[in-house]
Amino acid sequence: MDVRSAAVLARSVVAGSHDARLLVPGASAVPVGYVEDDGQPVLVVGARGGPFTSSPGLTVVAGGVEVHLGGRLRRLCHADQSLADQLNAHSRCLLGPNLRPGRVDLIRLEIERVCVRPAGGADPIAGPVADYALAEPEPFATYQHRAIAHVEDRHADGLARLAADRLGLDRSDVIALRISGIRADEVTLSVVTATGGWNVPVPITPPLAD
């Protein structure tokens, strides 16, 4: 993976999550919620509830990919409209077990360092911040985990019927399945039947635009 691809992957992971771990020198890593604002995470923490010092590190993990961001923390006095809209839209995600309802502080991480560890234990890639800042999140890398969780949870029977049809089997022959990948033009199903396991590609025609 080259540096530019790593930058797109990093932006996609950060854009697709609201959970991270914050590490500051001399303190244990703490879970924090955040929203992504043009590549920079804005942490949502209890008022005066965090150790905000120099040289923090923020780690976001999704789909086996680890993104490590370093930089400076800056408390925001107020949120502009787009950021306020994001906070309202994702308030249920942000008000987790580590943050009680009530007044919160918004802390922007101004990124100075980016390092990506791809899935599968590949070597980490440290990329220039400029590449990260210019990269755009790839929609299917950003949202596929949430989309997969939704479809597997709410539409499992439809997936099983689809897999059985592609394999020329009855619905009752499908023992288990999961979505192992999704792209604009294809969904891949990993299917277990009485006769073995199969990876079943299901084309999407025309490809999804959004």
Image (tube, rainbow, N blue to C red):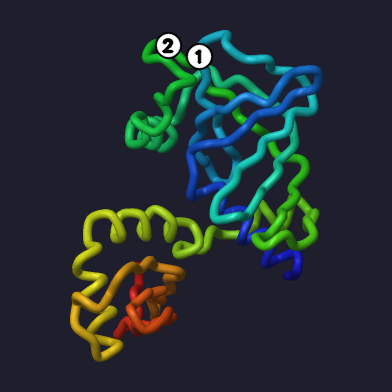
Which residue extends farthest top?
48
| Circle 1 residues within 10 Å: few <14, some 14–19, many ≥20 | some
**Disc marking residue 46:** 1
Q: Nearer the viewer, residue 106 or 58?
A: 58
Q: Amino acid at mark 1?
A: Gly
- Name the foreground residue: 60 vs 55: 60
User: Tag 2, which secondary structure?
Assistant: loop
* Image location of residue 103, percent across then percent down: 42, 11
x then y, percent, for residue 41 = 58, 37
Q: Quadrant of the C terminus?
A: bottom left
Q: Quadrant of the N terminus?
A: bottom right
From the viewer's perspective, tell me whether residue 107 is left or right of residue 116: left
Looking at the rendered image, the disc whose residue lies closer to the viewer, 2 or 1, is 1
State the residue at coordinates (74%, 37%). 70
Q: Give the image location of residue 13, x and y in percent.
A: 56, 52
Determine contact: label 2, label 1, CB under 8 Å. Answer: yes
Q: Residue 40 appears in which quarter of the rendering?
A: top right
Q: As displayed, is residue 175 above or below residue 65? A: below
At 56% from the left and 47% from the top, the residue drawn is 14
Structural distance between the alpha carbons of marks 2 and 1: 7 Å
Crowding near pointer 2: few (<14 within 10 Å), some, many (20+)?
A: few
Question: Where does residue 65 sit, x and y in percent of width and height?
Answer: 63, 54
Against 80, is 159 above or below? below
Which element carries disc 1, helix, strand or loop? strand
Q: Is residue 59 left or right of residue 102?
A: right
- Residue at 52 percent across and 19 percent down: it is 45
Q: Is residue 189 left or right of residue 131?
A: left
Q: Which residue is mark 2?
A: 103
Measuring 53% from the left and 58% from the top, which residue is drawn there? 137
Q: Amino acid at mark 2?
A: Arg
